[in-house]
Image (spheres, rainbow, N blue to C red):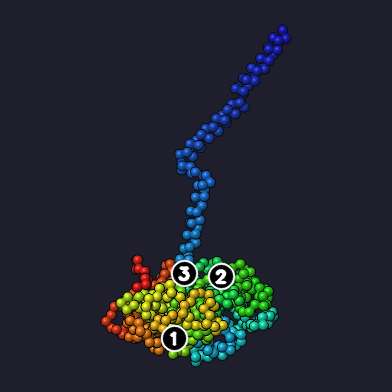
Amino acid sequence: MKGNQKDSSEKPIWDRSSSGLSMTRPGRLMIWLMLFISVTYIIYTLKIVSTSHPCEDLTSESILQQRPEKKAVAVAVKAVPAEQEATDLNHVVFGIAASSKLWKQRKEYIKIWYKPKKMRGYVWLDKEVKIKSETGDQENLPSVRISGDTSSFPYTNKQGHRSAIRISRIVSETLMSLDSESKKNVRWFVMGDDDTVFVTDNLIRVLRKYDHEQMYYIGSLSESHLQNIFFSYGMAYGGGGFAISYPLAVALSKMQDRCIKRYPALYGSDDRMQACMAELGVPLTKEIGFHQYDVHGNLFGLLAAHPVTPFVSMHHLDVVEPIFPNMTRVRAIKKLTTPMKIDSAGLLQQSICYDKHKSWTISVSWGFAVQVFRGSFSPREMEMPSRTFLNWYKRADYTAYAFNTRPVSRNHCQKPFVFHMSNAKFDPQLNTTVSEYTRHRVPHPACRWDMVNPEEINTIVVYKKPDPHLWTRSPRRNCCRVLQTKRNNTLWINVGVCRAGEVTEVK
């Protein structure tokens, strides 16, 4: 009976709850809300499916593959302004280290290469000098500045001179001398001595290879192995010139005075500069076209076998002999500017060829000299400088150089016949340069070799098309070809880019 009562009592409760869910007003609202949400979700899903693109595979591999594309776009956008405005002379400021004692004669070297209307720069002297208007000093020289006082800096090297501190601060002082408007257009600071001559077109060709917005310290070493050991193989020798990018110059100027005080025992300005570069963590970027020329005597061997790189600068002009015979040093350098103006990229570039009919080896240093040798010499030997000079310590020691050299001749019959450049011009009709080389008459030993004697040649004429884009291609020596002629006293040579398959073979 209790069971029946329980059943009868629970049944009405179940019936009430069930009918309440289906029949009451709140229950209807809940049902309509659920239906509305469901329909809305279905419509939204169908819209996404109909308008969206196929899904991409977002695996880690696909993401990695997409990243280079995004980076490449960013780099391409950044590279556009650089292509529109390549580095030029108006982006460079020169800082020239000079001495009041030597100013009278060395200012003539600066006049050879510096063009005030096209260049910016300052000559930094230890004290005031007279600027003579009648000699063209005002029109043909950079502005003269006096270096700041460095007496408070310690200097303990007994073999050196305190002027090294003054000279080492030239880049920083040059930066500080510019106003805010002038700084906007500066990309590079180039340092050199008053007895240094720059080939500015080739300097620009070198600087264009580098991003001026990065920190760069560009220059070259000494020719002297001992000098590099005593000072550093990681140092740019300031006489040969070096370049510092604007960001590096700014960083240097902020710490250089503190840096200099930490190195009182160093000898010169070059090693002080390199010591500060080491603290900044910036290594030397070597460009071997900057020439310190730590040698004595005749530069002929070095100039006649210049490496395959733009000829940028030459230093120590007061130490070495004039580069052309029977001339003053200044006049000889001025003579070199003639071929420099018509084809600066090809200046001093060596070409090697053979006259198989006469068994001669011929080496052309364009714009400077041509050598004719009896017999056959391999290109490997000809591209080594001949030892026409002594090392910095005035010893005939072939182990004292930081590069390979060769003797002037191994046999008296192999002494070269040298022809120096006497004239160079551009022929617009042929669209080529025509340079003439006249024999330098010096005694030659008698030779009994059974071959044509080069003494019969008085003049050599070299044809070469100007090649301003020579250094935008991979480095390679130009090729030269001996042209046949009926004139026994003149040799005709063509120099130019090597043709397909052309090889300088010993014949």
**In the foreground, 40 or 420:** 420
Q: Residue 397 at x, y = what percent? A: 53, 80
Q: Amino acid at mark 1?
A: Phe
Q: Amino acid at mark 3?
A: Ala
Q: Which mark, by number, is residue 284?
A: 2
Q: Residue 315 at x, y = what percent? A: 52, 81
Q: Nearer the viewer, mark 3 or mark 1?
A: 1
The image quarter in which residue 409 lies: bottom left
Which residue was labeled with disc 1? 324
Q: Identify the residue at horizontal 58%, vertical 89% (top origin).
A: 101
Local secondary structure at mark 1: loop
Q: Are marks 2 and 3 in contact (CB under 8 Å)?
A: no
Precedes in sequence: disc 3 or disc 1: 3
The image quarter in which residue 490 lies: bottom left
Which residue was labeled with disc 3? 86
The image quarter in which residue 360 lies: bottom left
Q: Residue 253 at x, y = what percent? A: 62, 73
When the figure is inspected, residue 144 is found, relative to residue 474, above or below; the finding is below
**In the foreground, 393 or 162:** 393
Q: Residue 481 at x, y = what percent? A: 33, 74
**Alpha carbon separation for disc pair 2 and 3:** 23 Å
Local secondary structure at mark 2: loop
**Alpha carbon separation for disc pair 1 and 2:** 33 Å
Q: Is residue 462 visible?
A: yes
Local secondary structure at mark 3: loop
Which quadrant is home to the N terminus?
Answer: top right
Q: Identify the residue at horizontal 52%, vertical 32% (top origin).
A: 39
